[in-house]
Amino acid sequence: MNNREYTIALAGNPNTGKSTLFNVLTGLRQHTGNWPGKTVVHAEGFFTYKDEQYRIIDLPGTYSLYSNSVDEEVARDFIIFAKPDVTLVVLDATALERNLNLALQVLEMTDRVIVCLNLMDEAKKKGIVIDIAKLSKKLGVPVVPLAARNKEGIEELLETIVRMVHGEIKTKPIVVSYSRAIEEKITKLLPLVKEIVGEEYPARWVALRLLDGDTSLLHALQHQPHHLLKGVPNYACHCSAKSI
Amino acid sequence: MTQAKLERLCDAQPGERFRITKINIEGTMKRRLLDLGFVPGCEVTVLQKSPLGDPTAYRVSHTTIALRKEESSNIYGERIGNE
Amino acid sequence: MRATVPPNPFDELMDYAKSLSDGDTREQIVSAIFQTSRDICKETITYTKREKLHETEKLDRIFTSKIWGFPIMLAMLAVVIYITIAGANVPSSLLAEFFGWFEGYITLAFEKMHAPEWLHGILVLGLYRGTTWVVSVMLPPMAIFFPIFALLENYGYLPRVAFNMDRLFKKSGAHGKQSLTMAMGFGCNAAAIMSTRIIESPRERMLAILTNNFVPCNGRWPTLILLASLFMAAGYTGGWKTLMTASVVVAMVVFGIVVTLTVSWVLSKTALRGMPTHYTLELPPYRRPKIWDTIVRSTLDKSIYVLKRAVTVAAPAGVLTWVLANIHIGDTTVLAHVAHLLDPFARQLGLDGYILMAFILGLPANEIVLPILLMGYLSTGALTEVDGLHSLKQIFLDHGWTWLTALNMMLFSLLHYPCGTTLINIYKETKSKKWTFVAFALPTGIAIAVTFTTAHIAQWLGLI
């Protein structure tokens, strides 16, 4: 009885099976190769689950969200300005250390995050055992193990998405603690950020970006791209997709 | 200064482990390297050189990243023995 | 709400933040994040099979080794092409026979209905033949080549190619990722133009765009394979013939790579001057692809693609060619007129007027060059039915072909302007008429120069 369409963003490092997951969720059958950066057109797809509509956006695969490149800015702006109902962070379970880097960055930006541990089949083959419950507790958000190309874990993921969009999951994202010098500066900046930028953006994260000298973010905040707000992102290609 | 004792990553040989102390690169490239795990304090293992001698593949936080000499000669640190 | 806040506070905030920050803030931030990651991993991950962890590295020691790196790359290319040629022969001729057999019935039906001659001409000799030729010549090799290529791609071999070749691209002033976009070109240059987006520096991206065409796309593979097997491997039989054909095609691909590197080098010293930008390349772990899934999907995808192209491009081209070949001005057809006009110039390139005209009419898609050429030849009065590769060769021989003609046509096909779709994509991506024109003119100039040189050297040496 709910006509609202939920928006899901897919973020992740290149080559973590993000496109595969996108294809599985939307029922698209696009070819996905194994080389970094092969997704050059950002795709948007739709699916229905339990009578509810979802729009899913495959953000460019990036190593971070620190506006080093156009791709990273696109991904960052979408999470900050379009405020997706859920952001799925797809991680390669076989290289978790590097991949978590991005997850921690996303967790500074939003609390509506589900961490997808993809390539669990590969991890298993390599004898990498991950304590999912503990990881989830540490990160403060749900963690779902997946093997997207074998369609394993998809059901659990969809269930988790449903519960999250209905507000049934309380998340408490981990807060990365920085060096004392940086923490002091953050404390100084926080009140100003809240006053000038507004409460609708993650203040701690904004303060960090400012300390980092990220002018592009401030510019974006100042000339807030209204078209991004729940609207259609200006992506190069729109793929249609069927429901699963 | 301790600087004098530092060695360049490009001089480390395949099989050797290397701890990064300093990255002498500016701008986007430095940020990219940081994102990939070339962070001061981190350990890198030299895997092997490309058939033509450059670039070289490194193992850094459980991933394999290839760097050209232009970059690896500006990453300083110390060799900490073989694998 | 926002409008009431003057823009000044933002600048002040930025200035204040700037005054607080020092040079290595980013380093400290990333270090802290990595430290957190490491701590989390330490507590949540256990490694039970240490020996399995570095399997990819062990494989890389072979695939990218000093001794074996390049031979393996070449061997992979050769094996893929060999399998393609060996496997495509039989289904190709079966398809051709089937279409020929079916054409007989269609013609009968037309006669039964007392359909006018011209209608039969347009629909059967033009549309039907054009489409079915493309299908029978294109479909089998493509349905074999691409699944194998997709397996290699999904396995994770392509980044190793980029790793091996990086130095060559650096030396020629191009971006190391250009080898990835080139690999995409094997499938389709138009798609590869889009994939150059992975190269961020505009200068190097332009190099990748301008030279992508020197990689034969799926519209040109069959032309190369067919001509190589008809003319270059003529003296051989059985497995040797396939091997010889494969070697010639591999040589063509390697030549295309050499041209790519040379052109990139010249451009980066002249019109697109600059230093290669720094970059990092990740070598992802090898992953065993889902073999059947990949094969089935890729075969289906490619088949649908080829069939679509056959209908959308080859069908109209077939009709157009037939019309041009049947409208008379004076006592010769329009087609013959044009071919005659082009002939003197084409001869200088070791080609003939019909071949050049086929390339010109084939601008929309490389797939249709060969069918147009055959239709052109057939319209000159030879009534031969094309029912197999042998009669194909006879048609060429009847029109004065030698191995040199075949070689020059292969070279011209490899090097000439990109197809219409690719040009449109280049315009979309570069937003520049000038560079789109360069993307057209540069390869064409090179194609003309190379074929001219080959033709004249061969004549001068008395090889022909």
Image: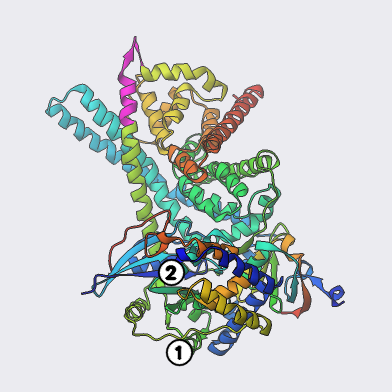
Residue bearing the label numbered 2: A10
Q: Which quadrant is home to the N terminus of chain C?
A: bottom left
Q: How crowded is mark 2: few (under 14 residues within 10 Å), some or many (20 or more)?
A: many
Q: Residue at x 55, y 65 (%)?
A: A217
Magenta region: which residues?
C318-333
Q: Are marks 2 and 1 in contact (CB under 8 Å)?
A: no
Q: In this view, does B57 lie above or below C149?
A: below
Q: First in sequence, mark 2 or 1: give its number.
A: 2
Question: What type is the residue that disc 1 sits on?
Answer: Ala
Query: Which residue is more in the foreground, C306 or C13?
Result: C13
Residue C222: name its quadrant: top left
Question: What type is the residue that disc 2 sits on?
Answer: Leu
Q: Which residue is drawn at 45% across and 40% down?
A: C424
Residue B19: name its quadrant: bottom right
Residue bearing the label numbered 1: A133
Q: Which quadrant is home to the C terminus of chain C?
A: top right
| Disc 2 from disc 1: Cα separation | 22 Å
Q: Does the magenta stretch include residue C325?
A: yes
Relative to residue A38, is residue C116 drawn left or right? left
Q: Mark 1 lies on which chain?
A: A
Q: Is residue A225 magenta?
A: no
Q: Residue furthest top?
A: C330
Q: Residues within 10 Å of mark 1 (few under 14, many from 20)?
A: few
Query: Which residue is more in the foreground, B6 or C306?
Result: B6
Residue C71: name its quadrant: bottom right
Q: Residue furthest left?
A: C113
